[in-house]
Structures are given as structure tokens and as C-alpha cells.
Image (tube, rainbow, N blue to C red):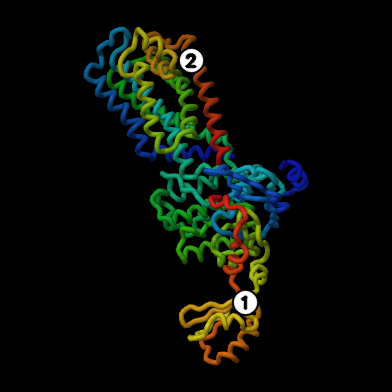
Amino acid sequence: MTTAATAQIGGAATKTNGGICLHGLVKSYQGPQSPIRAVRGIDVSIAAGETAALLGPNGAGKSTTIDMLLGLSKPDDGTVSVFGRPPRDAVDAGLVGAMLQTGGLIRDLSVRELVAMMASLYPDPMDVKDALEVTGLKEIASQRTHKLSGGQTQRVRFALAIVCNPDLLVLDEPTVALDVEGRREFWSVMREFAARGKTVLFATHYLEEADANADRAILMAHGRIVADGPTTEIKARVGRRTLRATLPDVDPSSLAGLPGVASAERHGDAVILSCVDSDQSIRALLEQYPAAKDIEIAGGSLEEAFLELTGEPDADEQELGAR
Amino acid sequence: MNGIAYTRYELLRTFRNRRFFLFSLGFPLVFFWLIAAPQHNKIISGTGLTYATYYMVSLASFGTMMSMISTGARIAGERQAGWTRQLRISPLSVRAYFRAKVLTGYAMALSSLLVLYISGSLLGVSLPAGRWLAMTGLIIVGLLPFAALGVLVGHLVNTDSVGPLMGGLVSILAFLSGTWFAITSGFLHAFGQFLPSWWLVQARNVALDGHAWGARGWITVAAWTAILAAGAAWAYRRDTARV
């Protein structure tokens, strides 16, 4: 089933032609009671050089999709093409580097030795010294891999992915064990790497990470893609703004009736209005309730967009355990 | 692709591991000195061999078997850590991966063999150079089934059970193959000859007349190698299919 599409593209492809193409992907697992339909038909194309974020809650099918993209598992149906080749061929050619969601390090080697070992497997690796430098591992390069903290281990795993100097870098929830500073450094290195014309796909729970670091966000829920576009566009799709004000002793239900307000709720002395037209709402609010103070209006966050697009209850209750 | 560098790092890792020294090198060595040293020149009846020669080869077979099967512990550990998945998205071929694992097993086995040869020499084992080589050659060939068994165990068993399984298996095989005491007749003698480890221990007979394995030995070792290699290939495929 994979051969027809990939062979066509593969025939004409140069090294990084064609980007990433997932077409009609379907994958189920045998769950404890019933089959888990982890991925239910997704189509995505990512152009070479693009940085895309794969967003979604647990069980959305992100890791399953990444496994198929990397050739670690075979789709039940559909095709995967990485730079015009089947994933396994792209991996064998050394075009792919990845930081998987789970995975420890092997023991009894130093950080430097482990990174050098990984580099030795690839045709065109980065300089090991440079890889250690940019990932902030220079100081601990001589330490044994089994004596590292969680954050250090995560940095080493990142170093292992970029030292390969791959054309496609795949990162599955890469900042999980990192502190705030670690995250900031991580993304700055990632963006530098992407700026060299590399294709990057990262999965994350953190919407601000997608917003700040990706050209494009692909939202997944229940094994399907629910939105796909520039992060700004996704925010605009929801289009709501939040109006917050201190206004005691007013019934929220009467506020909900104001022009431009979709819903209202009370948190102590504060009221929070979700507005489809915040300009109209603020005028009406000040006119009818001059006592309102501490007013803030905020643009729709990707977080809200995300909840709105992925939070819909699913018809099929079986996929709760899906990866 | 570049499996040579990979093999080099695998060797480095293995020789840094303290458990390796304890079980594959230390354990057989201690037993050798305990059993053979007090009466090293005495002949063990029915074998024509001195205690020193007999236990040098017996315990070498024990240590080298342990070395080869411990490949399984390393593979199981890497699977558990998720490292196997990391390697599968690298250009390292499956063939190069197993070659590195098996070569590492042999490097450990030959280290174990070397320290026992040295200990044996210190206790008066003296053989012509040709016989040392012939004995070593037979042990290397006799370890082939265990190389395959290591890979089989590594892909079949998790890290919790790999230790007890290895220890138990090697102990039983050692017992049935005449490692601890000479088995020269009876049921155990007839049964033992079906085991690959029996022929490993039989390499000691090189010291007697330069010959150790008849056709039966070669056939038994070849058959076990074929069976266990097929088993290892099956276990590997089954393991990757599940991921």
C-alpha cells in the first residue's frame, strides 16, 4: 500500500526533496479490552525547512504518528514519505535525527563518548565538540551517563539528536524534564538548528512553546487532526477576547446579556467576560456599570483555541488509553 | 555504516562494567584456585588429566559461557532503557549491531580464557603451542551456540528475569557437562553429549592427545548453533514487530 505513492516521489527526489508527507495514516493497537484506534486517518505535508509543532493532549495520537514517521511502527493503512523515501530508507541514509519521548541513556560511557558514538553512526555528523558546546554539556562532558540529573540527561538526548546533523529533526515532548532556563536554552538552540534550513517537527503539550517556536501548529485530538495552520491563524479562528474587571455585587447573568459578550463568570470580586466583540462589550460595560475598574482585555490565547478545538467529547470512548 | 567505532565503544563500556569482572573473570578464577591449587598435579581418575588441566578448561568453559550469555543481559538492558529504539532510528544496521554485541561477548570470553590459561600455567599446565591454539579454537567454535543464545535471551526476557535465568541456565549446563566433576559413564554421560556445553568442556581433551571432538561433537555444536540462531532471529523479529 505504501509503495505506489512513495516510489513515484522517490524516483525524482534529490536528497531533501519533497519534505515530509503523511497520507491517510491509520493505526490501531490491541488494548486491554478492545482495540485502541490511536490514529484515525491523518494527512499532513510538511515542507522541507519548515518547523511544525504537533499539539495535542495525552492520547491524541502524537507519539503514534511520530513512530510511524520514523519507521518504528508500520501504519495499518496510508503512506509515509520522508524526503521522497520510505522512512526506513531515510533513516538508513542518516537523514533523520530524533529525540523520542521515552528513552534513557546507556551506562558506562562519558557524555562525550556517548555523543561521539552516535556521531560515528552518521554520514555527515556535527563536530562532537560543537554539539556539546551548544547543548551546554561542555562542563559535564567527562561525566558518566548514569550519574546525570534528569535535566542533564535530557540535554544529552538533545545532543544525541543534533550531533547527527539530520535534515529532519523530530522531537517528542523534548522539554519535559527541563527547568525554565533549560527550556529557554533548548528552544534557542533548536531555532538556530532550524535556521540552517532543517526540517523540524516537535510534539508538545505546551502551547506557548508551539506559539514561540513553530511556523505552524498541527492540532491533534482523538487520533485526528483538528486544526492545521500558522499559530496566529489558529488563534484567530477562535477570535474571542477576554475582558476582566473588578465589579462586585453584579449578577454575571446580567453581564452575559451585554452586547458582544458570549459568556460571563464571576471569580470573587472579579468578573470575566468572554467576548466575540470586545470593543462593543467594553463600551456597554462602562456605560451600564461605571463602577467597573482594573479592566484588562486580553487576546485569545492558543490555550483557549486548543481547548475549543480539541475538547469536544468524542463519539467513541475507547481511545482513552491511546498514546 | 560505521560499525567499527560502534564496536569500539561497546567494548569500552563492557570492560568498564564491574559486574563483568566479578562474574565472568573473578568467579571462575576463584573456583579454579580453590579446587585445583591444593592438588594440582594429581590425576583425576578416568580422565587422564591433572586437576590443574581439568579445572582450567572446565572453569574456562563456565566463564566463557557466562560471557557469551551476558550479551543477553546487555541487550535486555538496552531494550528496557529505550536505547534500542534510539539505535533503530540511526543508520546503524541490524547486522552491525549484532556483530558488535557478539564480538564484545567474544572479547569478554577470551579475557576470561586468558586469565585461566595463565592461572593454569602457574599451576603446572604445560602444553605445546599447537595444543593451546587447538584448545582455544575449539572453545571459540564451541561458543557459537552461546552467542546465539545470548541474542535470543536478550530479546525474549526482561531485565528482571535475565539475571536469574542466566545464572540458573549456566549452573545447570555446567553441572550436566562435567564442569564440577568428571562424568565418565552412565546416563549423565550419555545425556550430556547432546548439550553444546559438553563439547566446550571436552576441549580439555586436547591436552591428552591433541584431539577432543569427534564427528559427534562437531555435529552437536553445529546443530545447536543452527537452532539457536534461528531462535535468535525469530525473537528479534518478534521484538521489533511489537514496538
Checking the image for residue A32, the label placed there is none
Q: Percent from the top left, x then y, of residue A243? A: 57, 80
- Which residue was labeled with disc 2? B220
Task: Name the residue tied to disc 1.
Answer: A262
Residue B66 or residue B81, whichever sits in front: B81
- State the SS at label 1: strand
Say whether mark 2 and mark 1 are on the same chain: no
Name the front one of labels 1 and 2.
1
Amino acid beneath label 2: Thr
Closer-to-camera residue (B219/B155): B155
Where is residue B59, by image quadrant?
A: top left
Residue type of the residue flagged with mark 1? Ala
Q: Is residue A94 visible?
A: no
Q: Is residue A36 visible?
A: yes
* Label 2, residues with CA under 10 Å away: few <14, some 14-19, many ≥20: many
Q: Residue at x 25, y 12 (%)?
A: B42
Whether label 1 touches label 2, CB < 8 Å: no
| Mark 1 chain | A
Judging depth in this view, the residue of B62 and A57 nearest the camera is A57
Q: Is residue A179 above or below residue A264?
A: above
At which x and y percent is residue A96? 61, 49
Position in image of residue A266 (x %, y %)? 50, 78
Q: Report the chain holding disc 2.
A: B
